[in-house]
Amino acid sequence: MLSSINPLGERARHQGFWVTVSWYLLGSVMGGVAVGSLSGWVGSLLPSGTWRTFAVIVVCLLGAGLELMGRQPPSVHRQVDENWLARYRGWVYGWGFGFQLGLGVVTIVTTASVYTTIALAMLSGSLALGAVVGGIFGLARAVAIFLVAGAHDPGTLRRALRKLQGGLPSARVLVVGAQTVAALTAVVVLVR
């Protein structure tokens, strides 16, 4: 994705990088809001009670464990259609790519945190809270685009992509840490 939408590629397609990125960010947040809202609404149909807090703990620890093991979760084997890059304007493919990635589950899922987030939105038991969880997820998925924002020549783009690839282990640690913090927060809520 980042090797497709970057200043160099957008310039070659006669598109404005920041226009495409703005729509990409909006699409990703909206995709996250959509999946989070739906999940929260489904969760609102389930009975309330402290079981939800216990479930949050289990889901977060399970997600963290799967991340630590480096397990590939079940997934569809579909990517965004790169033919859109030549067919549509930047704002169209920016929004379309972002929306699909923000949904999380309509393209290849490489991390258990996608399913963890959807489960947390559902366990919120609220359409509104689910939307917030999903929106944050969509934004978090999209901000990586800024890592290539300064790539105005092939060498800079290659270095940015290598740096991003090298940062994946750190990102995994960050995801595990966030899931652990969420589980600990749920424990504190239970104890209170």
Image (cartoon, rainbow, N blue to C red):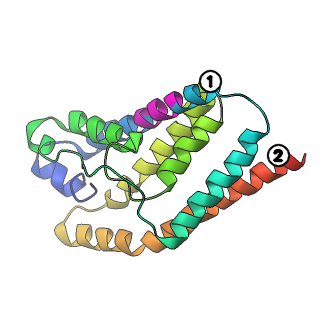
Q: Residue at x 24, y 66 (%)?
A: 157
The residue type indicated by label 1 comes to Leu
Q: Is residue 129 above or below residue 166?
A: above
| Res. 58 visible in picture | yes
* Neighbour tally class for label 1: few under 14, some 14-19, many 20 plus, Cα within 10 Å: few
| Residue drawn at x 45%, y 30% as measured from the top left | 34
The image shows residue 71 at horizontal and vertical percentages of: 45, 67
Q: Nearer the viewer, residue 172 or 153?
A: 172
Residue 147 falls left or right of residue 16: right
Residue where numbered disc 1 is placed: 45
16 falls in the magenta region = no
Residues shaded magenta: 30-38
Q: Is residue 36 magenta?
A: yes
Residue indicated by mark 2: 189
Q: Going by the image, does 1 lie left or right of 129?
A: left
Element marked by disc 1: loop
